[in-house]
Amino acid sequence: MKTMSDTTYDALPYEDLAFFHTHPANLAAVAMLCGLRAPPIERCSVLELGCGAGFNLIAMSESLPGARLVGIDFSCRQIEAGRELAVRAGAANVDLRAGDVAALDESLGRFDYVIAHGLLSWVSPDVRSAIFGACKRHLEPGGIVYLSYNTYPGWHLRGLLFDALRFHAAFEGTPLERVRRARAALEQMIDDLPEPDVEYARLLRSEIEALRDDQDAYVFHEFLEADNHPLHFAEFAVQAAQAGLRYVAEARFGTSAIAQRGDMRRRLEAVSPDLLRQEQYHDLLRNRYFRQSLLCHADLPPNGSPPHAALDGLTVLARVEPLPAEADGVRPFRLRDGSVVRLDNALLIAILDRLARAWPQPLGAGALADAVAADLAGIAMPPGASAGAAVREGVLVGYGWGWWQLLARAPAAALVPGERPRALALARLVARDASSVTNLLHSPVDLDAMQRSVILRLDGIATIDEIALALGIPRDAVAATVQSLAAAWLLADG
């Protein structure tokens, strides 16, 4: 009989990760852009279903020290490990509990934000229905639900890999043994393809090659677990409605139908005025295989177009590097993911210039729009649009493309380090054994060797001079490293 500690997630747990799009600062921003009054995040309550060892909530606690953060997971072993980490990180507002997410009762209470990342389509249909019911039951009247899940049509193609992996590593052995056996067999399978240039072979080869960089835990739980039931978006929306919830948008706002502009907007509207049909058609056009959908109570007002008034209440953050101008007035910019965009649009160039000068300081979206509108004085705007409205639309467009972040509130951080800087407690703990840590923006930061050496000593007691002496490194080098950690939002305020 299966017990509360007898799970494959104990045998092969996921690595500790924080998921930016689950953070209330992001969820509230998306909800506000859809015309909802999102719960204020400073003292919000968050329930995470299927929290694993709770790393997502523990990382969240550093930017939301006044929040109530509760995590539920079936694995006693992971909950115990998470509780130990929470104590070591000083995350006193994190409450991790072992329990069955399909059997929660009213005593748990209601929450402003209910999140479940990597759970909904990885359970049986009965448990999935119970998850929708739990979200409804434990959601405050104005709250927001986040659910991620695998979806069709994209998973029809991923199904090629699913079938091949399960054929080679069906049920024998430990999870790790099964993954390793399946990986070796897939590499041989590439060589065994009788017609390597046909469409099937090309598709399978591309999926196998992409899998090489994935963690063993991901491969097992994504492809070899007993339950993996992708959903069409339309099916997801029906099950949400049956539970008394309605669809709002995607946590990655730019992938939502409501966020589309230009030709795509016209294509979607030509299919149907109904948002749910537009979303399903959008999936068919994009071959989407993964969604991060937001829900609210069904009795809340329907979505509207992103209101500029809501935008003005948000904060913009962008790590942008202007590059030397090119011929014909083209301006290139390197974005936070390393990609380069080349622009000849004066409005977008002005926004990026302002954001580049501001980093790492956050900017209010309304203040940014007003400043850019002043920068563009005398430049022709689209017909019928004021400079302020045109810039605000540009801010929304760039957000939709993922060029910058919009947050309901930027966390308190020491962006200018003092003489006795203090790094985030969780980052200091993780940096002992890993080079990737989580910052106050709930995003990963990869540290080099110098940054790891320094961050371990940023306890709020040691001075920069003392750290330099202990490491045998010039003070200026330590000070520059500390400044880089501050700019990466890794230093605590106060």
Image (spheres, rainbow, N blue to C red):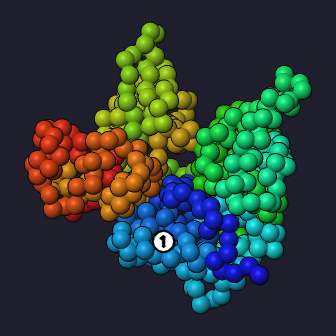
Q: Residues within 10 Å of mark 1 (few under 14, many from 20)?
A: many
The reply to whether residue 207 is in sight is: no
- Residue extending furthest toward the top: 327
The amino acid on which the numbered mark 1 sits, given as a three-letter code, is: Gly
Residue at image point 43% right, 13% down = 326
Pinpoint residue 221: horizontal percent, then vertical percent: 69, 58
The answer to which of 151 and 265 lies nearer the viewer is 151
The answer to which of 394 and 111 lies nearer the viewer is 111
Q: Is residue 322 left or right of residue 125?
A: left
The answer to which of 285 and 208 lies nearer the viewer is 208
Q: Is residue 458 left or right of residue 328?
A: left
Residue at image point 71% right, 43% down = 183
Q: Quadrant of the N terminus?
A: bottom right
- Counting every numbered tag in the picture gives 1
Q: Is residue 323 left or right of residue 184?
A: left
Pinpoint residue 349: horizontal percent, then vertical percent: 43, 27
Disc 1 on helix, strand or loop?
helix
Which of the 4 quarters of the picture holds residue 34? bottom right
Pinpoint residue 313: horizontal percent, then vertical percent: 43, 56
Q: Quadrant of the C terminus?
A: bottom left
The reply to whether residue 375 is in sight is: yes
| Residue 404 in the image: above or below residue 72 | above
Q: Where is mark 1, residue-wise?
A: 82
| Residue 317 in the image: above or below residue 77 | above
Residue at image point 36% right, 68% down = 89
Pinpoint residue 381: horizontal percent, then vertical percent: 49, 29
- Residue extending furthest toward the right: 194
The answer to which of 486 and 457 lies nearer the viewer is 457
Residue at image point 14% right, 58% down = 462
Which of the 4 quarters of the picture holds residue 448? top left
